Image: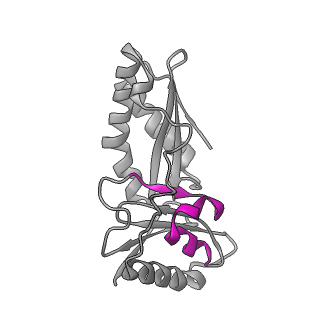
Amino acid sequence: MFIRTEDTPNPQSLKFLPDQPVLGQGQLGMDFPSPGAAKISPLATALFDVDGVVSVYLGADFVTVSKDQTVDWESIKPAILGTIADFLAAGIPVVDERQATATAGTTTPEDYTGEDREIVEQIIELLETRVRPAVAQDGGDIIFHRYEPGDGIVFLTMQGACAGCPSSTMTLKSGIENLLKHYVPEVTAVEAVA
């Protein structure tokens, strides 16, 4: 199996692109910020067994691994490549669907009524079409949590390489906030959810 790697804007994260799907097209990415969170994914669990791995993000066709800053990529990259290749070649499901649950703390347009629902639909549409593809190229993802109609604040979470990236705050404030404010005037600010 051939697996390409790409650098991300976060020097502690590397994007691994196998020549086959990871979660598959149309699937939302899955973020595992700790070994305990990885219990539903045998692949993420196996990657946490590599010394120095601190978080794993599974995308439709890529895996982003973040490492401890005291570890060099040269020392753990071969073990990560081997783990991903062996796992995907064995045909083991990447996620145990019986244990997978919806993302906690998120809302959907159905949780809102009237004009607020239309605003949330616009926000989600912009995130899906303009933001998510850009952050996926950098090995990450963005999750909509909620919109506060009274004060116009949108709450989002950056995942994968974007979660620990030094420029993620600038991406949220200068990029995403400006985009949402431009297209949805009711939005006054964007805040990160940890």
Looking at the rendering, which quadrant does residue 169 occupy? top right
Query: What percent of the width, then of the height, locates residue 160?
Result: 51, 57
Q: Assess whether residue 66 is covered by the magenta stretch.
A: no
**Residue at coordinates 44% horizontally, 38% vertically from top-left?**
176
Q: In the rendered image, which quarter contains the C terminus?
A: top right
Query: What percent of the width, then of the height, locates residue 20?
Result: 31, 73
Q: Nearer the viewer, residue 39 or 128?
A: 39
The answer to whether 10 is drawn above or below residue 114 in the figure is below
Looking at the rendering, which quadrant does residue 6 occupy? bottom left
Q: Assess whether residue 31 is covered by the magenta stretch.
A: yes
- Farthest residue to the front: give it: 98
How many marks can you see? 0
- Farthest residue to the right: give it: 70
Display colour scheme: one colour
**Residue at coordinates 67% horizontally, 69% vertically from top-left?**
69
Q: Nearer the viewer, residue 52 or 31?
A: 31
Q: Is residue 185 left or right of residue 80?
A: left
Q: Nearer the viewer, residue 153 or 176?
A: 153
Q: What's drawn in magenta, residue-wise?
A: 28-49
**Residue at coordinates 34% horizontally, 36% vertically from top-left?**
126
The answer to whether 40 is drawn above or below residue 135 in the figure is below
**Residue at coordinates 45% horizontally, 51% vertically from top-left?**
141
Query: What percent of the width, then of the height, locates residue 30?
Result: 48, 56
Q: In the rendered image, which quarter contains the N terminus?
A: bottom left
Looking at the rendering, which quadrant does residue 123 occupy? top left
Query: What percent of the width, then of the height, locates residue 189?
Result: 52, 27
The answer to whether 38 is drawn above or below residue 27 in the figure is below
